[in-house]
Amino acid sequence: MNLDTWINKGYELIIDFGPKVLTAIVIWIIGSWSIKLINKAASKVMNKGNYDLSLKKFLLNLLHWSLKILLIVVILGTVGIETTSFAAILAAAGLAVGMALQGSLANFAGGVLLMIFKPIKIGDLIEAQGELGVVKEIEIFTTKLTGLSNREIIIPNGSLSNGNIINYTTEGTRRVDLTFGVGYDSDIKKTKEVLMNVLTSHPKVLKDPAPTVNVSELADSSINFAVRPWSTSDDYWDVYFDITENVKEALDAAGIEIPYPHAVEIQKKA
């Protein structure tokens, strides 16, 4: 074909498809703008209705992608692709797509279950799938945690909903489990008194439930005490570290020995 033929073909394509493409572009711009407005309106409605933050973000995410898909279908119809044929193709490929995306579908179903039963919410400190962190966001397919060392942890919703979840925030308080060993020459009553004084003097240790100190084990080289203060969930690590340090200082001040492997130390010096 010569140049004139190519020009004529191009002109015909512009005449046939130009208006449709321009219309599709306009629909995309207006549609995207409308989706943003709808999302903002839905967000305001949920805020007035005091929706749970986790549920709100999940529903807004779902609404956003549903409207996007609808917009794409409308644009395809505008360009000239019959949506009925498009739907038929999707239906025919449904089984294959379902098999390929079964993990994603399971994660979506898991996200729905998390929203229905609400074992967790944004801001909760949880342990799941071998990870410990604060729930940052519950999305359609995944849940994001912020780890204690400020790492972002992403867990698929399918695994999260089907596995064990330990929620440290739900009850509002936590027991801090600590164990300290003293030498066999130590007076048990005096040691318990020193340990209890450390607990009761700490401002972040709760009075109710009351802290406890008990002999937990007569080990090979030490008498072990189970020290159990309670704190709010937010104060857990402050209490954990402070009590550990304060106990060492209090036992030293009281002349109560914390045993350690002397034989190993002698070998090291030798």
Image (cartoon, rainbow, N blue to C red):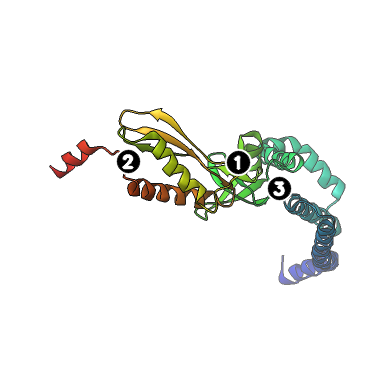
- Taking depth in this image into account, of 229 and 120 the one nearest to the observer is 229
The answer to whether mark 2 and mark 3 are in CB contact below 8 A is no
The answer to whether mark 1 and mark 3 are in CB contact below 8 A is no
Q: Mark 1 against mark 3, which lies toward the viewer?
A: 1
**Residue 224 point in image, percent of width and height:** 39, 33
Circle 2 packing at 10 Å, graded few (<14), some (14-19), many (20+), is: some
Position of residue 144 relative to residue 19, above or below, is above
- Taking depth in this image into account, of 51 and 25 the one nearest to the observer is 51
Q: Is residue 222 left or right of residue 154?
A: left
**Which residue lies under the disc numbered 1?**
209
Question: CA separation, marks 2 and 3?
Answer: 52 Å
Circle 3 packing at 10 Å, graded few (<14), some (14-19), many (20+), is: many
- Taking depth in this image into account, of 248 and 58 the one nearest to the observer is 248
Position of residue 46 relative to residue 223, above or below, is below
What amino acid does circle 3 point to? Ile
Mark 2 lies on a secondary structure that is loop
Q: Is residue 165 left or right of residue 93?
A: left
What amino acid does circle 1 point to? Pro
Q: Give the numbered dot on residue 229.
A: none
Task: Please tell me which residue is depicted at 70% across the width and 39% down the height of the picture.
Answer: 110
Q: Is residue 180 left or right of residue 81?
A: left
What amino acid does circle 2 point to? Ile
Q: Mark 2 against mark 3, which lies toward the viewer?
A: 2
Q: Earlier in the sequence, mark 2 or mark 3?
A: 3
Q: Quadrant of the N terminus?
A: bottom right
**Which residue lies under the disc numbered 2?**
258
Question: CA separation, marks 2 and 1?
Answer: 28 Å
**Which residue lies under the disc numbered 3?**
140
